[in-house]
Image (tube, rainbow, N blue to C red):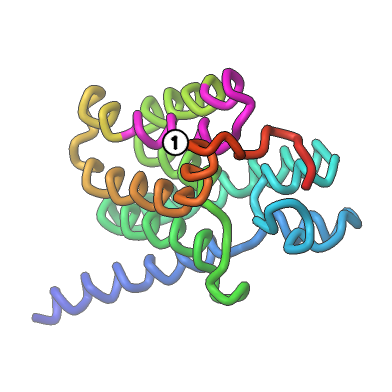
Amino acid sequence: MPLLESATSVLIFWAVIGYLLGSIPYGMILARVMGLGNLREIGSGNIGATNVLRTGNKTAAALTLILDAAKGAFAVLLARTLAAEDAAQVAALMAMLGHCYPVWLKFNGGKGVATFLGLMLALAWPVGIVCCIAWLIGAALTRISSMGAIVAASSSTFLLLLLGYGYVLALGAVLTLLVFWRHRANIKRIRAGTEPRIGQKG
């Protein structure tokens, strides 16, 4: 029983660490530091890189993308190094939830695309690389960021199976569902033909 309690305590610890790392709102921080205004009052009001790009500052958008991905990857790599794979997967899930539902922003966070990609790169780097390519292709062909996210998330589960990462399959499926859930309004707009294009303001 003490061993079981110890293992549970370790997972709870990494769940908290993962959530706290994931909940850092880099988009809002960078926008404030770089004098770009309040992201909640710009474009879609989202805190992610796509909305930061609507400020017209490509550097800020790129930094947001990198940092949002890095925080997810860091949570996984830190837990894997200091604990074990199960802790890494718990930290991954909680980092995603932290980004999407940060307590500091009244649980109204980002849509998780960059964090999802960072998590995939850390959990299964070949899958992460292909997902990044899929996101780039989907976004480039349609000029719709959310379409790139949907393409990348949709391909991840198949890629995990194909490339031999079945042990991450359950987590990958949950992360994919979270991406789709956070993009449910975007999906409706894509179907209606009203989804904003990359770089479009307002």
Furthest-left residue in this view: 1
Which residues fall within the magenta stretch?
138-156
Figure check: 146 above or below 183: above
Left/right of residue 121 with respect to residue 9 in the rendered view: right
Report if residue 67 lies within the magenta region: no
Q: Position of residue 114 (x, y in %)?
A: 55, 43
* Residue 165 is at least partly visible in this image: yes
Residue that carries the numbered disc 1 in the rendered image: 150
What residue is at 57 percent from the left and 46 percent from the top?
70
What residue is at 74 percent from the left and 47 percent from the top?
52
Main SS of the magenta part reads helix
Q: Position of residue 7 (x, y in %)?
A: 21, 70
Left/right of residue 26 with respect to residue 72 in the rendered view: right
Q: Position of residue 169 (x, y in %)?
A: 23, 41
Report if residue 151 lies within the magenta region: yes
What residue is at 85 percent from the left and 40 percent from the top?
56
- The count of marks equals 1
* Residue 73 is at least partly visible in this image: no
Going by the numbered disc 1, the residue's amino acid type is: Ile
Q: Nearer the viewer, residue 201 or 15?
A: 201
Left/right of residue 15 with respect to residue 110 in the rendered view: left
Q: Residues within 10 Å of mark 1 (few under 14, many from 20)?
A: many
The image quadrant that residue 4 belongs to is bottom left
Q: Secondary structure at mark 1?
A: helix
